[in-house]
Amino acid sequence: MAARTDRSAPVTATDPGGAPVGTLAGVGPALVATLAKLGLERVQDLWFHLPLRYEDRTRVTAIADLRAGERAQVEGVVEAVERGFRYRPQLKVAISDDSRQTLLLRFFHFSRAQAEQLQSGTRLLCYGEVRHGAQGLEMVHPNYQRLSGEVAASVDELLTPVYPTTEGLGPKRLARVIGKALERLPSDAQLELIPPALRAAHGLDSLRDALLYVHRPPPDAPMSQLLLGRHPAQQRLAFEELLTQHLSLKRMRAAVRQRRAPVLGGPGELRRQLLAGLPFELTSAQQRVGDEVARDLALPQPMLRLVQGDVGSGKTVVAALAALAAVEAGYQVALMAPTELLAEQHLTNFRQWLEPLGVEVEWLAGKVTGKARKLALARVAAGAAVVIGTHALMQEGVAFARLGLVIVDEQHRFGVQQRLALHDKGRHDNLVPHQLVLTATPIPRTLAMSVYADLDVSSIDELPPGRTPVQTVAISNARRAEVIERIHVACGEGRQVYWVCTLIEESEQLRAQAAEVAHAELSATLAGFEVGLIHGRMKSKEKQVVMDAFKSGELAVLVATTVIEVGVDVPNASLMVIENSERLGLAQLHQLRGRVGRGAVASNCVLLYQPPLGQLARERLQVMRDTNDGFRIAEKDLELRGPGEVLGTRQTGQLAFRIADLARDAHLLAAVQMVGERMLADHPRQASQLIERWVGGAARYADA
């Protein structure tokens, strides 16, 4: 697939925002380079660079009326100044106003010249967040300006937008540049790209009015609505942004569908042999999803399918059946997992299932080096049937003979570019491989409708028979001794236990118990029982030795970091303790809990927490106690944390919405889909212009 990088479209009458930002007055080469760091290269990029929040500097609040937790603007006269050096340097400035109340301004970073300017009797206009201090209300590092003589303070006429910025670009300067760009906003007719009939059918207001409102809200604008992103102007822009994402994903899907893929249909003899040799029968959900995958593979168009299912629902077997269809048709299969632990779990399963059928399973991960790596690469290039590994599969030097199927596990842990890089390796004879994406993090319907619009979605919504629901309790760390006694009893009954910590080493900043400290504590307390330790800093061989010992029953307790979140299957482990559970997200807690309850014995999960609990942590722990349903948990996780966290993409830019919020704006998605389908079918040119406006060079489409 080739990346689209051209964002410097020429200025035309129908493209009023396509001019480079350097055409704006006062924007020289240095500023152009700085703006480019934010992706702001054209005038229209500035139109859609929307505020993060707003500050109300349209009025001055009396100090007597200030409330902690609010941001406000005050005017006052300096009454006293004190420079202190206890613990660290700080400058404290007391100001008062006509209400005869005092407010403390506190600065931890200040210059000598700044301190000398803030003398008694100086009039100041200050803006900042009010908080409770040891001596009453205070502002820490407020914005301020000195006022001269008796001149009245000048307040803003509009709410002040606060934009996302970057190093070397102050907020005021960026606001001025955006203001110049807004002067070039064209008429409604020129700006609108959604056809009038579709706008009218869905009650969409003027885009021009919406942009002007969010950049320059009037002083009487409902601040609470704006801060929540629920103002009609923001909703209008959110609709267009969601529509753009929907269109770009659909375009990507359509472009891939135009390619040809190998037909991976056959007599199914390998499939029958595998099913006959399994010690269990497939659930009806596994059979249904397996059939959906098989139908896709038998077509000459590339499969793009996401298989989602809760922890332990049996996605791996479905993937193995898909792999056998490819092998039987004479093609290779690549399975990529985000961690070596998870990849090794797949390796163990696939070798156990496929090698008795005469299917070669190759291993290629970062730890495979030297001569072993050369031999592995040679076998892959020569046509090894199934290749399993980590991101090492995408590195240079890895060449496949006839790659027909790419399986990506826990896709949200990879950037989109990583997944596409592996897909690119499979191009041969004008064919591209089929793609099967697996996730044990159930995707909320809201996300499936939007983020995965380029994929067909299958759900394994049934657990294998014999699995017992896990009982979950939340217990304060003050009752730690009771929990350890409970572990002693469980081990005495022959059961095994996970003890999960969130840090490897002790930290003074965080109250999380370190895995190494917990291992020492439990080893001393649980005399007579073997306690193991596993964490991400151990070498792969060391981790494997510990895991093998736990699986074989040599270890009664395994102390681990969240490295065991996925890919570990020990049916005899029936108790899990998660320390500092208040620090983890719902999806991660649910994944960890899924390591127990994999056998017929009743299983339990203990969520140890460090009080006092915040509201968000309290809600998360309550959800874990209330349900084992991964789909319900995923919906709640989206509501509490937002899509970037749920998908693990907050740092990747994969889900970098400027204004839309999938949890908040889910009600828009049905209309977004309808408008999107109509635009792709009847107005493809406007659809392309929308994608260029909002996404530009960040979009990547398959070569048709």
Image (cartoon, helix red, strand yellow):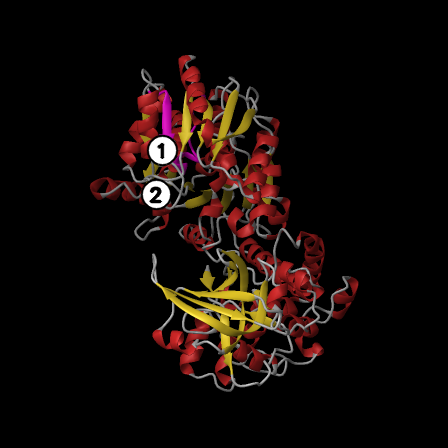
With 669 as the anchor, is 605 left or right in this view? left
Q: Quadrant of residue 515?
A: top left
Q: Which residue is mark 2?
A: 507
- Residue 548 rendering spot, x and y as whole percentages: 33, 25
Q: CA distance from mark 1 to mark 2?
A: 46 Å
**Image disc number at residue 606:** none
Q: Is residue 691 visible from the viewing direction of this image?
A: no
Queried whether the magenta region covers residue 557, the answer comes back as yes
Q: Secondary structure at mark 2?
A: loop
- Bounds of the magenta span? 555-573
Which residue type carries mark 2? Ser
Q: Residue 583 location in percent, x, y?
A: 47, 41
Helix, strand, or loop for circle 1?
Answer: loop
Residue closer to the observer: 345 or 252: 345
Q: Nearer the viewer, mark 1 or mark 2?
A: 2
**The magenta stretch spans residue 630:** no
Is residue 230 or residue 666 the one in the foreground?
230
Q: Mark 1 belongs to which amino acid?
A: Glu
